[in-house]
Amino acid sequence: MKIVKVDVPVMADLHARGEHPEYLFWVGCAGAFDDRYQKVAQAFAKILTFLDISYAVLGKEESCTGDPARRAGNEMLYQMQALQNIALFQTYGIRKIITICPHCYNIFKNEYPDLGADFETINYLQFLDQCITAGKIKPEMLSTSAVCITYHDPCYLGRANDIYFEPRSILKNLTTNLVEMERNRSFAFCCGGGGTQMFKEAEKGNKEVYTERTEEALRTDARIIATACPFCMTMITDGIKNKNREEDIKNFDIAELIVQSLNL
C-alpha cells in the first residue's frame, strides 16, 4: 500500500502566505456534512495529494451554492448565496474550481455566469479521465475486476451537461466487466433525489423512484453500482437496503474505486 499523507490546504492560509493554488476543490454540502460522502471527498483529496496538484479548499468559508434553494423556488436565497460565493472567489482570485457534486458543477458552470461569475468549472470525472489519459494516473484493474460493475448516470452530469464518456472511460480502466442498465446515458432513469426531491415527502405512486432504479441495477447482476453524485449515492444505497442486499451489493463512488485501484 502506498502511504499518502493528506494534509488538505485551506485557501485562507495559503492566501495569507501569498500563495495562489491552481484549483479550488469545492467540497460541497454532502462532502462536508454527510458521513458517507465525506469518504468520497477524502478519496478525491487523497488523489489530488498523490498527484501533487496545487489546490486548496475553503474550509469554514465554504457555503452552499444555493442550488437547493433555486430548485425549491426560493430565488432570493439562491442569489444571496451565489453573490456571496462569487465575491469570495474574486477575493481569492480563484480561476478554476473542481467539484465532486454534479449539482454544484451544473449551477457553477451554467447559472453563476448570469450573475457575473468568471471562472472555469471542472467536474472531477473530467479531471480524473484527463489524468489517466495523460499517464499521470495509472490505475490497475481492481482485484474484483471480474466482478460485474454497472454505472448510474446522474441527471445533472449526464442529461444536463452531456458527461457520459468520462465515467465509462475511467471504469474501463478498472474492470473488465462493465455492464449497462436498461436505461442509460441520455435515457437513464433518475435516482429520485435531485431537484430537492430528496428533502420532501414522497408523492402518490406505487413505487419509490430509487427502488425502480435499484431494481434496474440489480437486473444487470452487478455486484458494484458505481455512482458520481451524493444524491445518487444516498438514494441507491437506500435502494440496496430496501432490497436487503447490503451484504452482496456495494455502492462506490468512482473516486473511491480509483483509490482502491491505486491501493492508496
Image: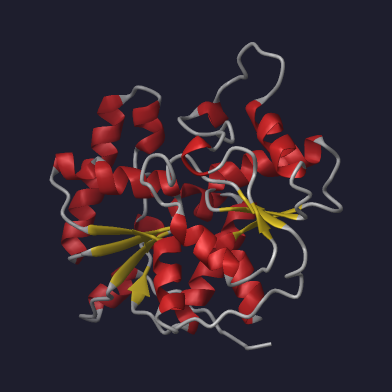
Asked whether residue 142 is in view, the answer is: yes
* Residue in view at x 63 percent, y 43 percent: 234
Is residue 83 or residue 155 the one in the foreground? Answer: 155
> Which quadrant of the view contains residue 145?
bottom right
Quadrant of the snapshot with the C terminus: bottom right
Q: Position of residue 54 (x, y in %)?
A: 34, 79
Asked whether residue 100 is in view, the answer is: no
Q: Is residue 99 left or right of residue 256?
A: left
Is residue 188 or residue 239 the one in the foreground? Answer: 188
Is residue 49 or residue 127 the one in the foreground? Answer: 127
Q: Position of residue 257 (x, y in %)?
A: 63, 67
* Residue at the outermost bottom position: 2
* Residue in view at x 37 percent, y 37 percent: 67
Q: Position of residue 134 (x, y in %)?
A: 39, 81
* Residue in view at x 17 percent, y 61 percent: 91
Is residue 60 or residue 179 the one in the foreground? Answer: 179
Q: How many discs mark residues in the rendered view? A: 0
Quadrant of the snapshot with the N terminus: bottom right
* Residue at the outermost left position: 116
Q: Position of residue 205 (x, y in %)?
A: 66, 13
* Residue in view at x 66 percent, y 73 percent: 260
Q: Is residue 237 left or right of residue 183?
A: right
Q: How is the image coloured?
A: secondary structure
Q: Above or below — where is 253 with respect to 117?
A: below
